[in-house]
Image (cartoon, rainbow, N blue to C red):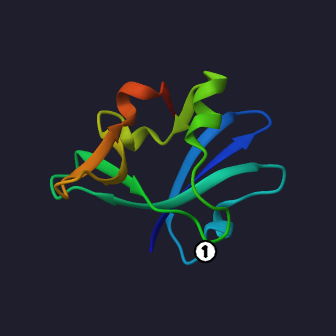
Amino acid sequence: MNKFIIIKDKEEGFILRYANTDYHKNMVYKGEDVFGGGMFDFSDDGLTMTLYGKSDDFGSPRWYDVKKTKEKIHIDEELDGITIRWFSGYDDDWNPIYLDFTDMFVFDYF
């Protein structure tokens, strides 16, 4: 299953890590603090990564805690140029609501 976590590494800072794995905890290394996680999907054209849900191991992503630090989020360079968004629910007419993280966070590609 496609899962992601937000971690804070003592040396690298925040990292958005994603993988096809059974458990979120499989993506964490010793010394990393986890700021939650969830699942992800790519659009059919591969230009949008949608993050959603919560981790059974670590709970919902704590986006506010990440945002208030004003630190960059390190992310794999293969995602450079891709829109990253968070599915936050539905409006009153059942239209999906997305938050565009490309505008909200500063990403550092490695």
| Residue lying at 76% horizontally and 57% vertically, measured from the top left | 29
Q: Which part of the image, by quadrant, shows the N terminus?
A: bottom left
Q: Quadrant of residue 37?
A: bottom right
Residue farthest front in this picture: 92
How many residues crowd mark 1 within 10 Å: few (<14), some (14–19), many (20+)? some
Regarding mark 1 in the picture, which secondary structure is present there?
A: loop
When the figure is inspected, residue 57 is found, relative to residue 51, above or below; the finding is below
Of 10 and 60, nearer the camera is: 60
Identify the amino acid type marked 1: Tyr
| Residue lying at 57% horizontally and 29% vertically, measured from the top left | 67
Residue 57 placed where, x, y %? 67, 69
Q: Is residue 30 left or right of residue 74?
A: right
Q: Is residue 45 left or right of residue 6?
A: left
Instruction: Count the numbered circles shown.
Output: 1
Residue 97 placed where, x, y %? 28, 47
Residue farthest bottom in this picture: 22
Residue farthest top in this picture: 70
| Residue lying at 61% horizontally and 67% vertically, measured from the top left | 24
Q: Is residue 77 left or right of residue 28?
A: left
Residue 107 placed where, x, y %? 48, 29
Residue identifier under label 1: 23
| Residue lying at 53% horizontally and 73% vertically, measured from the top left | 21
Residue 10 placed where, x, y %? 80, 37
